[in-house]
Amino acid sequence: LATMTSMRGLTNFITDIRKCSSKELEHNRVLKELSNIRNKFQKGARLDAYSRKKYTWKLLYIYILGYDVDIGHVEAMQLITAKTYSEKKTGYTVCSIMFNERHELLTMITQAIKNDLNKETPEIIQCLALSMVANVGGRNMSDALWKDVCLLLTSGTSKSIVRKKACLCLLKLFKRAPDNIEVDAVAPKVIAMIGDEYGVATSALTLLIGLVGYYTQKPPVPPVFEDAVPKTIRLLQKLAFKATRSHNDYKYYGTLCPWLQIRCLRLLQYFPFPSRDEDKKRLEDTIGKILSTEKKKTSKGAKANKSNADHAILFECLNLIIHYAQNGEFHNRAMLEKAAALLGRFVALKEANIRYLGLDCMARLAKVEGTLPKIQEQLTTIQYSLHKDLDISIRKRALDMLFVMCDESNAPKIIQELLVFLHAAEYQIREELVLKIAILAERFATDLRWYIDVILKLLTLAGDYISDDIWYRVIQIVTNNERLQKYAALTMYKALEGKIHENGIKVGGYIIGEFCDQMFSKKITGRNLFNVLNRHFPTSSPSTQALLLSAFVKLANTFEDLRPE
């Protein structure tokens, strides 16, 4: 920044751009400057280093403004090969922003980057090269440079700032070409960095999360990564209990290294619960300590920032507990109940972000055996979020939460709440809401007649959002339950006497046609059944009309008064 501000021509150009009162004036000023720079670059070797840097910075500014820049790329690459730091910094910065990993000119500077990654190069130059590779490195650059980056990472002579950047750079290269990296050779060195200074440990854990996450999706996970678990637990315990002499630079509003704690907790979620008693004890004590730092309220300013950091750690800790519990590895019932109680407080807070995360986390915790009764105590609060919250994303999470916590004891109450909510629900969530109501009604129906009533309400309130699978399932259930057939047919007959959605016409037409023999009485004749179906025939779609025609044939076969003479 100091270098840029000392260039009078650059600062004058930026000032001129800011003074432009219209887009047209700005465009004309940019075209004028591009013409001037093009003429200057045509001088070639006669252009001194200062001027080359100045014009290259100008091109970068023009590019950031959104204009196409078709000159200066070669000059920026030449600056990378220069010997002074200021020239290299300009070249690397411009190339990192103006190039992408598919840019055809990248291959021309790969060797220059490789030279700057040499362990004999000053660390400040190494950092520039690592930043460039991390920003625009692709498959080709990964093939050519990964060994040099690994050497900087694993070398015992590299300084902390270089190892931090090397970790993040190697992660980028690994994502582009996973087969290149020799994990068994690199992983032990990276794991050893967990015990290093906190900045290096944060970068090392970020790299480990990326490596383990990849092999979790494409198993098996190499056994070498298991050595990271005890080291991570010890580091997490040190941070949680603040058993360190770290400087204030490592604290964020009084919270010791929140990002490092979050990465420790996130890495542990890729592994099973530790088997060694010593590690178990440390981890349980640390989890208990983190849960005890919960803050009930958030406030403005610095206190709000501290609260955000503490809650971020706490939610990641809850994710770790849920991970262990869902795998059947965590049996500390008291801690699970405490986690459920904390989440119950979060969903009642005014802070929208915390409410959202609380509902999302609670929905996953509810799937753990034995936690549902404690979570069901928050039913009233969750129902309030569903109906009254202004944020649709929170209402979606509340809907998911009600779906998960529904059981035989509260199913009628929850389904009734969802039916009430259906009246005012946004169109974006109606289809999901209708599907969840249909699933719950079938899953917890103690009386199938109640199930038919619920589906009929859905057809009335949100027929457009009833998928074919739902009404197919209704017909299947009615067909397979003889005791239900007459009730279903009579119910659909009454519904068809009024206004009903076309999906309801399909259900009613099929059921009445199939089970009309069970409906005959003094009040209901074949003619009545035909009339109630026929009144919907003119306004129905061809597919529905075909179904009604089939029902008419079945009615004619059952009732003699409907047959032609």
Image (cartoon, grey):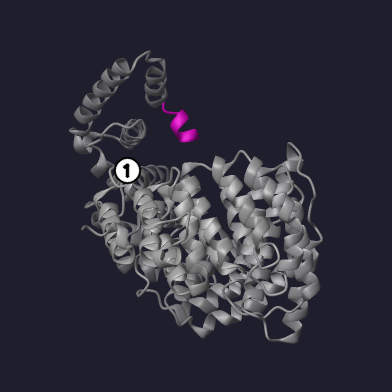
Residue at 74 percent across and 56 percent down: it is 378
Residue 413 figure quarter: bottom right
**Residue 252: image x %, image y %?**
71, 49
Asked if residue 508 is positioned above or below residue 541 in the image, the reply reads below
Asked if residue 536 is positioned above or below residue 447 in the image, the reply reads above
Range drawn in magenta = 1-7
Quadrant location, the C terminus: bottom left
Nearest to the observer: residue 403 or residue 510: 510
Nearest to the observer: residue 153 or residue 374: 374
Q: Most extreme residue toward the top, as rendered?
A: 21
Examine the structure image and report whether residue 251 is included in the region drawn in magenta.
Answer: no
**Residue 534: image x %, image y %?**
32, 48
**Residue 265: image x %, image y %?**
64, 66
Q: What's the amino acid at mark 1?
A: Met
Nearest to the observer: residue 557 or residue 58: 557
**Residue 528: image x %, image y %?**
39, 52
Query: From the viewer's perspective, is 508 left or right of 488?
Result: left
Residue annotated with mark 1: 98
Residue at 70 percent across and 78 percent down: it is 330
Residue 350 appears in the rendering: yes
